[in-house]
Amino acid sequence: MGNTFGHLFRLTTWGESHGGGVGAVVDGCPPGLELSADDVQAELDRRRPGQSRITTQRQEEDRVEILSGLFEGRTLGTPISLLVWNKDARSKDYEEMRVKYRPSHADYTYQEKYGLRNWMGGGRASARETIGRVAAGAIAQKILRERCGLEIVAWVDCVQSLQANVDGATVTREDVDANIVRCPDSSVAETMIARIDEARKDGDSLGGVVRAVARNVPAGLGDPVFDKLEAELAKAMLSLPACKGFESGSGFEGTRLTGSTHNDAFVSREGRIATSTNRSGGIQGGISNGEDILIRAAFKPTATILKEQETVDVDGNPTTLKGRGRHDPCVLPRAVPMVEAMMAMVLIDHYLRQTAIRS
Amino acid sequence: MGNTFGHLFRLTTWGESHGGGVGAVVDGCPPGLELSADDVQAELDRRRPGQSRITTQRQEEDRVEILSGLFEGRTLGTPISLLVWNKDARSKDYEEMRVKYRPSHADYTYQEKYGLRNWMGGGRASARETIGRVAAGAIAQKILRERCGLEIVAWVDCVQSLQANVDGATVTREDVDANIVRCPDSSVAETMIARIDEARKDGDSLGGVVRAVARNVPAGLGDPVFDKLEAELAKAMLSLPACKGFESGSGFEGTRLTGSTHNDAFVSREGRIATSTNRSGGIQGGISNGEDILIRAAFKPTATILKEQETVDVDGNPTTLKGRGRHDPCVLPRAVPMVEAMMAMVLIDHYLRQTAIRS
Amino acid sequence: MGNTFGHLFRLTTWGESHGGGVGAVVDGCPPGLELSADDVQAELDRRRPGQSRITTQRQEEDRVEILSGLFEGRTLGTPISLLVWNKDARSKDYEEMRVKYRPSHADYTYQEKYGLRNWMGGGRASARETIGRVAAGAIAQKILRERCGLEIVAWVDCVQSLQANVDGATVTREDVDANIVRCPDSSVAETMIARIDEARKDGDSLGGVVRAVARNVPAGLGDPVFDKLEAELAKAMLSLPACKGFESGSGFEGTRLTGSTHNDAFVSREGRIATSTNRSGGIQGGISNGEDILIRAAFKPTATILKEQETVDVDGNPTTLKGRGRHDPCVLPRAVPMVEAMMAMVLIDHYLRQTAIRS
Amino acid sequence: MGNTFGHLFRLTTWGESHGGGVGAVVDGCPPGLELSADDVQAELDRRRPGQSRITTQRQEEDRVEILSGLFEGRTLGTPISLLVWNKDARSKDYEEMRVKYRPSHADYTYQEKYGLRNWMGGGRASARETIGRVAAGAIAQKILRERCGLEIVAWVDCVQSLQANVDGATVTREDVDANIVRCPDSSVAETMIARIDEARKDGDSLGGVVRAVARNVPAGLGDPVFDKLEAELAKAMLSLPACKGFESGSGFEGTRLTGSTHNDAFVSREGRIATSTNRSGGIQGGISNGEDILIRAAFKPTATILKEQETVDVDGNPTTLKGRGRHDPCVLPRAVPMVEAMMAMVLIDHYLRQTAIRS
């Protein structure tokens, strides 16, 4: 069941890193939306490996084909099938993985779960799986933009201990894409890039935090109990490879405040009810209140490194393993469009649910 | 759709804080389990308001009745209906809420979502809604314990900046329940209690962090992509009232490490494959690896305080509001059984899914 | 998973024929609908045993309580919990069932499925389970009526070989309820009643067919592939106890026509596109076309009879069994409100889905 | 939501009759199953147009590619993506459909539902959509065969009024495929073929009934209430193009019997509990009892005919329409593998559910 996300706007992804290709089926896209492969490709290019010297040098062109759901440039309301062929298979790089478990990868857990695994790569745990998410997210973002001017911007907020300072109310995607680390705070971006460069040369990897904002969110999205907007966003983020933490609004820091200093006072602003502060992160009781939605997602350093590590083989015997070839020293710049895509998918699903409830 | 959680072990909760009662329907409980209302009541008593001087003094007895799904002391495999009647309705306390929005409560967002609201209390955002969760969680935990010896223990890890130091590998529920703040580190528990007491007298509230461990988890639970075990746990936690953050394994702290220092080396231990460290928190590629699952959930200070606050009325006019009567100075001790319940529900659901896959 | 029906308007039922009670949770009911227990009770009274001499003489009052989801006479948009207590438990009637399997009942299959069963009655296979359906259907019908004037009327079309002749375009619920067999064709109703009376005296039971029409259905409801409106209606009907067959539009009879005689020509009527005939039964390609939806549901004679029958005991030894006390000689009159309820639930669910798609 | 079928074994289909291709994603296939494209192709060849003179002469090769989910000839437990490219697009045949609604097709209802439609063919209502179903059904049948020797056989039971007489207990797929009409009763098969041939020459179409049996079904499959095995099968059948009726066991005919003549007596047979007759069709209380499951599905004559018909254009003006080129005079022979596939998908889903419940 784990390969489908969403209820009314529903994404199913498929594909291993090795094998024919990867793809996605988007069910529930409203009919009549102008859409072309180019709309989707633009986002895939932001996710693509090899886009800069600080991401993996694996060369993947990742050209998307749309096989269904479109007619004369518009969505039909029927499933949209998206396909990207696999290319860059260097299977001899993987031969060692057949008999050894890579530390902190999914090799061992897949073997335990399924009794077998595609050892020529990461299987469904490969970052290639996120192609379908980013593709679907591009469609979701287009609808949200057209329907209610909703816009989503994510950026690299932290690399290790390097913390950016960015105003979520005004930051634009152009600001974010202005440098290769996708951190719109120019005072730390260069240091971040240098730090990643160093890790790359060292065959090591770095973690950090991506932050995201959604602006112009209508009040009323989200369900009160299990499908609280924050709960859905948390699941969306933690479903991304390497994500190990999530915060909404004031998050962990907010636990140090008292109720009287944490509560967001209601005020009247420009003819509508607003809050004077936004520690709630735009969500109260699990439902959007019309303020900016603000979240953070923590990504651990990626597990693939080029240093020698201790591990065991499939029979449990101690051995060592040393990654070869190309690795991704920091997943964060490429995680930015993934975070935006997942956020968009949560919001479009609840936007459609709310439409059903209140129309 | 937001009132149902889980797929194969499926909980639906219902009920407002005011009105007839609150309850739950558990669908998918395996047949043949010995179960009585007492099993459930024991956990509800740990969640109950008024259990100590540092929780809300609202007196709610919360006696559970099981209306279906049992026969001669065993589960039938059919839906288990659980009911707790509402009692302590002091509606005049709430009259003011009819015309004013309480800061950082769900009053305003419910009004925007539904166009009306039950202003006599928190509606579905009330902590009473969690009665059904804790009840269902008691059932889930009993199954997990009997089937694979799996045990879940949660505790208060942090009140504001007061940080406990607890060994997740050995802590027991008895340790946790040994004091009223449910923090098994006696070196900070008293200070935590004093701090909460102070907030209570001040009419204010405090936030903090609950940590939880699941031990004896079989390897192989969780799905690779959207239903990663961490993603499901994140959603489960963020669906709890006042929860604003989630961490799995090394969480936010882990983002400061490099891949070479973060990766968990595989080792052979007692005839099975294990890891030498557990920064993964028992989950790799979204799937349990047999190590302890370790998570943290951040809870903001509860919104209900007895101090005067600025807000607006339903027409948007500025006004002030001062809570009356009883409030909960710190939700954390009562959040402990809620966290355990939600964790149990995620694990039982994936335990049953895995059974379907591999049997 | 089998205890929940629908996606956006979602019904979960619970309860055995013996035990505390039976009930239902309706999730997804739009907010703001005027609703009282009386609205629901009116339909339950049409489903109630003991309502006439040709239904079971089991006396069940079946008073419904609404425990949540209402405030000041309106729905809140939150789950509506409905409860009916069990009363008429004559457990000594059932003692024999503990050791013998009743022919064509669910005793044996429950035992095989779950490894145990509530032998004091039919468990979830009891007709009491349909109380929750009829209650939820009353709510669904009220919404459909208010939103688009949609009305549903079902009637007894056939008892054994006694076939009624009724005009689906004009028949009203008053016509249906004018006699105790709920057949609005007075030329056969009396014969039907006499036939059932005879079966009752003989301790035997009769089957037949219920027909139903939905009028003023907006065009566009239903999904093209697996959730075709006919497919959903078929599932809804076959989920009713004793239902063994379903037809939409021309049904089985229509298979004897040729395409040229079966196709419904499109015409212009009163400013909208209509069809000159309605062999499609208001559904084309799985989607409503605005014409009356017409279906039929076949109900086998109920399995409980008062005659001696051959069977086996739980150890497989041949034995005989003779029902005692009261039985239902013909389920059809009470099936009428059940059919209406299930039809309403399918239509409201797709009405809400369509709202999400096209608003 | 309508493009996904099943819960634990879950099929999503995509693709219009015109456009890139059609395909399917199968999620939940157990890992370790030996599988190749050939296994799937064999069933697709039985569904293929142009396979005999009495089906449509449209030439579609329908070669399936498996793009994911397999490794070294075995299923991985991950989604299986199946793709068939579209070829035979004769768009000028369809130009007229742009402005006219074909009687009893989905043109008008799609337009009403979505506000636009792919007028170059039947869109999702095209029979090409069933390619994905037959492909997934081939996988499901292979698992059921290997796990419990379960076998499914469907055949043409009726063409118009021509009724076959076939023993469901013994009929084999070889018997069925022995003639082009897929009716294993040789005494009527030739007449059926002649009748269809005549309709083909006349540019008309014929309907009829497909019957199917599942043998060696374990007792205990199916859920008691909404997901009764019959309800699921009914939905599965009615979701097939042109299907307008469904019967389980004694079906409509059984409504003419009395309870005492309809009930299936339990007997002991070969050391297990069985029934002396099988009017229940292998399902009691919605759950399989171990006897053969027997169903019938009614298919109306297909709407596409080559005769002139009255209809309206998209503006509602009266006009006529005459199909051109190739048509399918009788869908029944090709419906046989579709019925088998859908039956298999229902059974595998409940087989996996039952595994989760009872292991």
Image (cartoon, coloured by chain):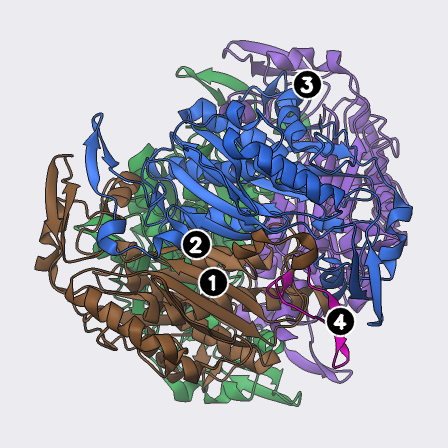
Chain colours: A brown, B blue, C purple, D green
- Between disc 1 and disc 4, the foreground one is 4
The earlier-in-sequence mark between 4 and 2 is 2
Residue A245's tag is 2
Point out the frontmost of discs 3 and 1. Answer: 1
Determine if marks 3 and 1 fall on one subunit: no
Q: In the rendered structure, which segment of residues is drawn in magenta?
A: A263-283
Q: Nearer the viewer, mark 4 or mark 2?
A: 4
Query: x%, y% of residue C7?
Result: 61, 55
Answer whether labels 1 and 2 touch (C-beta < 8 Å).
Answer: yes
- Residue depicted at x 78% and y 55%: C76
Q: Nearer the viewer, mark 2 or mark 3?
A: 2
The answer to whether residue D32 shows anywhere in this view is: no
Residue ID for mark 4: A267
Q: What amino acid is at disc 4? A: Val
Quote the CA–CA distance across marks 1 and 2.
8 Å
Q: In the image, is D58 to the left or to the right of C169?
A: left
Residue A172 in view here: yes
Residue A341, magenta (yes or no): no
The residue carrying mark 3 is C120
CA–CA distance between discs 3 and 1? 55 Å
Marks 3, 4: nearer the viewer: 4
The residue under label 1 is: A296
Callouts 3 and 4 close, C-beta under 8 Å: no
Q: Secondary structure at mark 2?
A: strand
Q: What percent of the width, then of the height, locates residue B76? A: 58, 25
Q: Amino acid at mark 2?
A: Gly
Q: Residues within 10 Å of mark 4 (few under 14, many from 20)?
A: many
